[in-house]
Amino acid sequence: MAQKPSIPKGTRDFSPVEVAKRNHIFNTVKKHFQTFGFQPIETPSFENSDTLMGKYGDEGDRLIFKILNSGDFISKVDDVTYSSKKSSSLTPKISEKALRYDLTVPFARYVVMHRNEIDLPFKRYQIQPVWRADRPQKGRFREFYQCDADVVGANSLMQEVEFVQLYDAVFTDLGLDGVTIKLNNRKILAGIAEVIGAKHLLVPFTVALDKLDKIGEEGVKKEMLERGISEAAIERAAPLFSLQGANLEQLAQLKLMLKDSDTGTKGVQELAFIISAIEKLGLKTASLTIDVTLARGLNYYTGAIMEVSAPAGVQMGSIGGGGRYDDLTGVFGLKDVSGVGISFGLDRIYLVLEELNLFPEAIDQSLQVLCVNFGENEAFEALKLVSTLRSEGCKADVYPTAAKMQKQMKYANNRKVPYVVLIGAKELEQEEFIVKNMSAGTQETYSLKRPQEFLDTL
């Protein structure tokens, strides 16, 4: 007996309806990427390991899927390394490539390799799948799509302002009103680490802080202790967890808290610029708020960082995020090229739209017109009609066999076809066709010589 097939954990098959809904999100995001002046690129699904490793911090590196070398890769491993059974020693010997973890690092590699072909500032968007060896759970998969937009070669904070507007435009268009765009700055986090005496532990500090929404305040404090941050330093950082008030009030508190840190003060100034600009420009449906506990645990962020949360009442992690990286291309030999970018979490956005019933009603309508098959002669005339309808952009088809009427109508109902065309022997003789409106239960007769009259009703 054949074994029942399966797919790897954290991956999914998508039905026609699900693909239609995903494409609705893709198309909406892509439309706004283009209206904001971004250009599309694509990069390979896998990169050289040294391109990816070391760019995401220890936690990110653990989640990178490695690809085994082809051929008899084990024979090339020396006995000492093999017998040590240490993956950190063995992996470089048997794997030189890895599936991409995100689209940002491959984009930095792209900029460096094609720097003589692009004009700076370069605004690019990219919609492709990425892979992470994460523990699958609701809204978190091992294979998923990212929808990224980045600008490199521009230091202006107006880019951050534009990305806030882009988030607002996309989510408004999707009907997802009431999202919250949370804003912070890595310079503020660096300044806090400095004033609490943990400057040398900035990465452990931000990695732990980034888990606040998952493990809570006490969990974060415990992890900070485990990562070598002293109790005294954690106590001095306590105001972080209770910072409240409007954006301007929080900025005032941060300014006072970071007055002895030049780096932290600069971060406060950058936040103030973005918030002031957005207050002047206004947002359609989103809200912008400071969240000083937002860390986004990726090592390459250096300035403003942002994250989007779903409307109140929806239990979901972030549905978008990004930030400023001042020298990501530097690791590939191209210094002083600043960049900033954001990403849309397609799969989580899908789940939120599904939960709130925000997908358009007719989104899964893959067929507008189905012609019933009454036999060879009738089907041939139906195919001529269908060809005319298709040439005008109408999604039309002929049932392939002269099956029982009941079976053909059931097929039409299952496909949610709004119009069924009947061309029987009588209609063929009179050069007519009958259109049955499936939802209203009515029908109209049209001339086969003037199909445009039917098309005009669609």
Image: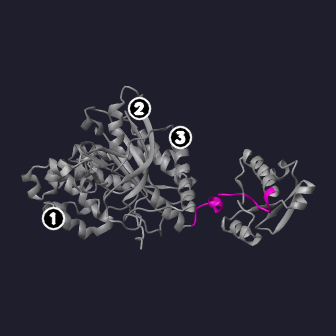
- Part of the protein shown in magenta: 357-376
Q: Position of residue 452 (x, y in %)?
A: 83, 48
Q: Nearer the N terminus, badge 1 or badge 3?
A: 3
387 horizontally vs 332: left or right: right
224 horizontally vs 187: left or right: left
Amino acid type, residue under disc 2 in the picture: Pro
> In this figure, what is the number of numbered marks?
3
**Residue 225: mark:** 1
Task: Say what secondary structure mark 1 lies in.
Answer: helix
**Residue 34: mark:** 3
Residue sitting nearer the eye, 119 or 189: 119
Is the residue marked by circle 1 packed among few (<14), some (14-19), or many (20+) residues within 10 Å? some
Q: Quadrant of residue 415?
A: bottom right
Q: Quadrant of residue 16?
A: bottom right
Q: Residue at x 24, y 53 (%)?
A: 61
Q: Considering the image in quadrants, where does the N terminus appear? A: bottom left
Task: Say what secondary structure mark 2 lies in.
Answer: loop
Q: Does the residue at mark 2 contact the one at mark 3 (Cβ under 8 Å)?
A: no
User: Which residue is the site of mark 2?
Assistant: 121
Is the residue marked by circle 2 packed among few (<14), some (14-19), or many (20+) residues within 10 Å? some
